[in-house]
Structure formats: C-alpha cells, structure tokens
Amino acid sequence: MNLYLMSAAALCGATTFIHCYFGGKAAAVSLLRANDIHDVPKYTNYYCWHIVSITLAVMTIAFAWAAISPPAVEVAIMAELLAVAFTLWNLGLIVWKEQSFRHMPQWVLFASVSPGLLV
C-alpha cells in the first residue's frame, strides 16, 4: 500500500467531511433559506454544492484506490489534477474579486492533497 496516496485519501476524506458537514450548515442551509434569491439561481447553486460533494467523495475513492492498487495510479493523477485546478481557481478568484483568504479557505484543503503526486 502506498502511504502517500492513502494520506491524500485521508486528507481528501476529511475535506469531504468538512465540506458536507460544516460547509453544509454554513453555506447550503443558508442558501436554501435565502428569500432574496430567485429559485433558478438558488437551486442551481444548491445543485453545484452537491456536485462538489460528489467530486470530493470520488477524489477520496480515487486516492484510496490508487493507494491499494498501484495499476490505478491514473485515477490518483486525475484527482490530483482536480485538486490543483480547484486550488488555482480558488486563489485566482480570491485575488480577482478582492476577497479575504481567511473567508475563502477552501484552497488550503485542496492544496493539502495536491503537492507532489504528479512526480
């Protein structure tokens, strides 16, 4: 078993939990309770929330699968590419929209699973 990839799976699993549990309370529930957002953008954002949940869970499975089965390394590379892309997009969005790094910390979670897996 590849301990590095299993560590990435554990970190990604923790990210999935944080997103679903804590983020669900802070973002998804608040979004659904908002009365000043029209239904289409509201439920589109809620749908996207769950797309992220699914993506995080699949990334966790990909890292774990590759950790247990070395021939599946390509799935870990795909999860790695997603983590890098999500990190870069989050950082770019923070700078572009002049947001606080403290208020948009998602990049830290994705960066924690991304360095070095492509080497």
Image: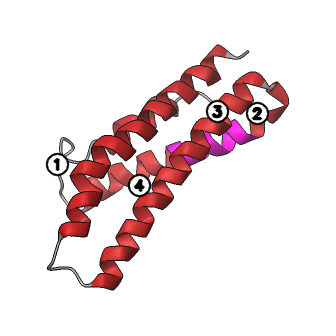
- Which mark is in front, 4 or 3? 3
Residue 35, given in percent of the width and then of the height, sits at 15, 77
**Secondary structure category for the residue under label 4:** helix
The reply to whether callout 3 and callout 2 are in contact (CB within 8 Å) is no
Task: Give the mark nearer the N terminus: 1 vs 4.
Answer: 4
Residue 38, given in percent of the width and then of the height, sits at 25, 85
Residue 119 visible in the current orientation: no
Q: What residue is drawn where x is 41% and y is 54%?
A: 89
Task: Give the mark nearer the N terminus: 3 vs 2.
Answer: 3
In the image, 38 versus 116, the foreground residue is 38
Q: What residue is drawn where x is 70% and y is 17%?
A: 2
Q: Amino acid at mark 4?
A: Trp
Q: Quadrant of residue 6?
A: top right
The reply to whether callout 2 and callout 4 are in contact (CB within 8 Å) is no
Residue 44, given in percent of the width and then of the height, sits at 39, 75
For the residues marked 2 and 1, what is the alpha-carbon distance in whole angstroms? Answer: 35 Å
Q: Quadrant of residue 3?
A: top right
For the residues marked 1 and 4, what is the alpha-carbon distance in whole angstroms? Answer: 14 Å
For the residues marked 3 and 1, what is the alpha-carbon distance in whole angstroms? Answer: 30 Å
Task: Give the mark nearer the N terminus: 2 vs 1.
Answer: 2
Q: Which residue is mark 4?
A: 89
Q: Which residue is mark 1?
A: 100
Q: What residue is drawn where x is 43% and y is 68%?
A: 47
Quarter placement of the N terminus = top right
Q: In the drawing, what numbered circle is on residue 63?
A: 3
Q: Which residue is mark 2?
A: 73
In the image, 110 versus 34, the foreground residue is 34
